Amino acid sequence: MRNPCLLLLLLASSMPVAAVPTDITVRVLAKDAKFIGSTFGGVRVTIADADTGEVLAQGVTQGGYGDSERILEQPRKRGVPLATEDAAAFHASVDIDRPRRIEVSAFGPLVYAPAANRVSSTQWVVPGKHVSAGDGWLLEMPGLFVQMPPPEAPIHLAGGSAHIPLVAKVVMMCGCAMSPGGLWDSNRYEIAGSLTKGGKVVGETKLAYSGNASEFKGEVEVREAGSYEAMVYAWDPENGNTGVARASIVVTE
């Protein structure tokens, strides 16, 4: 080739572009509450190419709840992060050689998978342009964490009826407890349950605070033996935040 400059240009264009380490910090904030971290099992985070599905990094958020006053009580100002140094996060460094449309998804809390939710968001990430300052890549996890343990003993009909206890643990998705008059005032939430048999609702009840943090109790009377499905929901009328738990209950003669 007569033009050496053109030859060098062609050679350079055929060489692979070096990947650049790019930092991404992901934090997951429970709706109307605090960061989901180690105490509640954390949140499983997946960082992937939104267009190809290639997984670039995976891990679990680790750290604490963060500062209650900073997150929930102080007026939020632009540019002031919610997270303190101890706030739960997942830190990753991904090697990318071109701008990529990145999707971050989060599933949790992992302490009890049936109560977990999933949330995701997408944005462009440019090589070497980190997404880690301030709160980093901040996701909000909606929902209320509701857990309903099965009855401690078999339930038998006595005198033609049985009273089925519905007991539920209801906390925020970060694990923060509810109590009457507390920061998460249990009086604010509607917590109720029902029993169904053969797809038909046979009883409903409101659940009341039991005296133990985040524990709510009610009962439904039944008059037939058989298999029942118990369901408890918790609902915040001020923002629509909702959680549900289900359990199977057998009543014998």
Image (tube, rainbow, N blue to C red):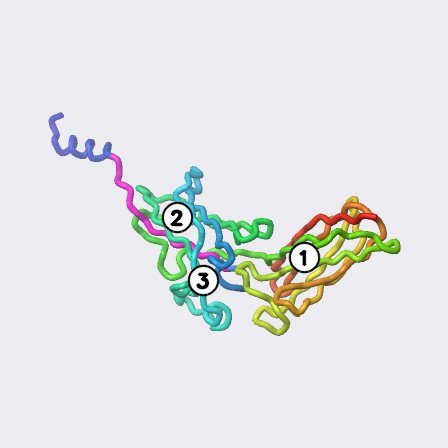
How dense is the environment of label 1, judged by Cα within 10 Å: few (below 14), some, or many (20 and up)?
A: many
Query: Is residue 231 shown above or below 1?
Result: below
Q: Which residue, given by chain and number where applicable, does mark 1 sit on? A: 233
Circle 2: element type:
strand
Q: Which residue, given by chain and number where applicable, does mark 2 sit on? A: 124
Q: Give the mark toward the camera: 3 or 2.
A: 3
Real-space Cα separation, disc 1 to disc 3, in angstroms: 27 Å
Span shown in magenta: 16-29
Circle 1: element type:
strand
Q: Are circles 1 and 2 on residues that touch, CB within 8 Å?
A: no
Nearest to N terminus: mark 1 or mark 3: 3
Q: Residue at x 49, y 52 (%)?
A: 43
Percent across and percent down for residue 30 are: 52, 59
Direction from residue 64 to residue 142 in the image, left or right: right
The residue type indicated by label 1 comes to Tyr
Query: Is residue 170 shown above or below 19?
Result: below
The residue type indicated by label 2 comes to Trp
How dense is the environment of label 2, judged by Cα within 10 Å: few (below 14), some, or many (20 and up)?
A: few
Q: Give the mark toward the camera: 1 or 2.
A: 1
Real-space Cα separation, disc 3 to disc 2, in angstroms: 28 Å
Direction from residue 188 to residue 60 in the image, left or right: left
Direction from residue 231 to residue 177 in the image, left or right: left
Between 230 and 131, the residue placed more toward the observer is 230
Percent across and percent down for residue 33 are: 53, 64
The residue type indicated by label 3 comes to Gly
Percent across and percent down for residue 110 are: 52, 51
Q: Which residue, given by chain and number where applicable, does mark 3 sit on? A: 64
How dense is the environment of label 3, judged by Cα within 10 Å: few (below 14), some, or many (20 and up)?
A: many
Which residue sits furthest right?
159
Q: Give the mark toward the camera: 1 or 3.
A: 3
Real-space Cα separation, disc 1 to disc 2, in angstroms: 38 Å
